[in-house]
Amino acid sequence: MNKKSTRKVWFITRPERDPRFHQEALLALQKATDDFRLKWAGNREVHKRYEEELANMGIKRNNVSHDGSGGRTWMAMLKTFSYCYVDDDGYIRLTKVGEKLIQGEKVYENTRKQVLTLQYPNAYFLEPGFRPKFDEGFRIRPVLFLIKLANDERLDFYVTKEEITYFAMTAQKDSQLDEIVHKILAFRKAGPREREEMKQDIAAKFDHRERSDKGARDFYEAHSDVAHTFMLISDYTGLVEYIRGKALKGDSSRINEIKQEIAEIEKRYPFNTRYMISLERMAENSGLDVDSYKASRYGNIKPAANSSKLRAKAERILAQFPSIESMSKEEIAGSLQKYLSPRDIEKVIHEIVESKDDFEGINSDFVEAYLNEKDNLVFEDKTGQIFSALGFDVAMRPKAKNGERTEIEIIAGYGGSKFGIIDAKNYAGKFPLSSSLASHMASEYIPNYTGYEGKELTFFGYVTANDFSGERNLEKISDKAKRITGNPISGFLVTARTLLGFLDYCIENDVPLEDRAELFVKAVKNKGYKSLEALLRELKETS
């Protein structure tokens, strides 16, 4: 993608700037879609009905667009705040927080949480239809960032609309707070000519639109309305005050209280990286209501001065695993024993494993590392770790029943007496399940491992780092394997993202470790799954 054409400045869809009316927008959507039974995607009549219901609610002017574009804009706002998403079949699916708003439960708390945890990137801004895309460097929570700026003593507890437009809204990472503070201070100290030059430079560097001779003025006109919206929704949180049209004002008398609440928010709701797995998983997790969220055990290790370094070291070591909650104490101790003393291991296990808090879900560090893994052996090992977290009894690179080592990477046992064989394919591009590879699986791998440790071989599969093709050859492998072994053996193709998404789904929905493997095997039907949505749809049809 042309870097100049990507967004380098904050943006938000803003048909309604006041979060107080997000609930009404959802209620109008519920009515327009007949309680979400009517298809949304491509249905302009429903889009227009939504505009009509918004007008009936009194939160939109009583004029309906000829093509329903107004309704789509309001829907975009609801998706931005993760109240809902559109599934693969084109129907609206409420997230838990969306359901709570419609039910009228903790409306302010839940809306406030969605505002505070708004982030770039999020599920809506990553949809194929959203243009232009944000620059890939974005990893920031804009509302929290503004609240921190306005409550910064160095800025005298305020930040102006102009400063937000030119400086805050160009920040791409939460870690840029000090950098933006220093730029604002320099701007305040500068004279009129120098200020104008600074604004011209920013317009030239950050505006994704075509430049003109009036660069700085055009930049302000284009982006200050977004700044105005962010100021309004920040005011809604109660952590800053909006001086209309002028500035966001912090509160020096409450600074310790505000800092503590920000720290608690960041601990309870860590930055969401599920966009790497699935936009649906991203929307569902971002759209958890205030009572559904689970705190991270990492975040709840007490940061006492004499244990903070130990905590950080333990976190770095354990980041190599997809899900700590699926590991036994013995497995955790084994992973730490090369690095820590027995006493320190005992302390870490007590603080992490035996704390009363639940995990927030899948380990985001593991997700990022796994999806960008270049080393084939490490990719195989991490794939094995995911199957282990799914409740399978995993053996890596096992010898065949004749004692010879073959090329299969993973054996995944389940149910006490059954197992499957899994090939992990770390192709940079698309993995093609060719006829020759299919023949090798059917005539070599399956016969060599049939009867492994006296257990029944029930499935085979491929996990691919990226896309795949050749799904039809799964059936051919099954047919040939049955002729050779006499047993029905089904297979699957699944992408690494889909596999991660399934683990994340199991963790978030409290699927017991002992049930996860059997649930996964239900989807092994000589089919390929390129998305979590496709896998879950298959499971739904099976049940």
Image (spheres, rainbow, N blue to C red):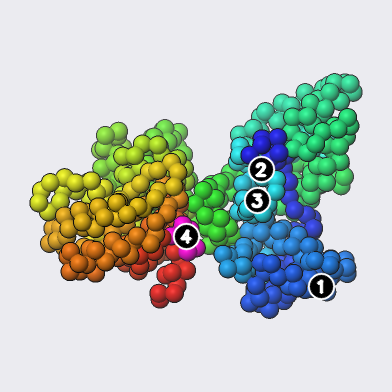
Residue 95: x percent and y percent?
A: 59, 64
| Near-viewer residue (352 or 415) | 415
Residue occupying the point 79% across, 49% down:
229
Residue 532's disc number: 4
User: For this view, does 361 lie left or right of residue 257?
Assistant: left
- Give yes or no for residue 244 being in the magenta stretch: no
Disc 4 marks a residue whose amino acid type is Leu
Q: Amino acid at mark 3?
A: Phe
Q: Secondary structure at mark 2?
A: loop
Residue 27 appears in which quarter of the rendering?
Answer: bottom right
Distance from the alpha carbon under mark 4 to that under mark 2: 24 Å
Which range is magenta? 529-534
Q: CA distance from mark 3 to mark 1?
A: 26 Å
- The residue where tag 1 is placed is 52
In the rendering, at what x and y percent does residue 85 appear?
Answer: 62, 62
Label disc, if present, on residue 125 of the rendered structure:
3
SS category of the residue bearing label 3: helix
- Give the residue displayed 67% in from the left and 54% down from the top: 129
Q: How many labels were placed on the picture?
A: 4
How many residues crowd around disc 4 within 10 Å: few (fewer than 14), some, or many (20 or more)? many
Q: Dots 2 and 3: beta carbons under 8 Å? A: yes
Q: Which quadrant holds the N terminus?
A: top right
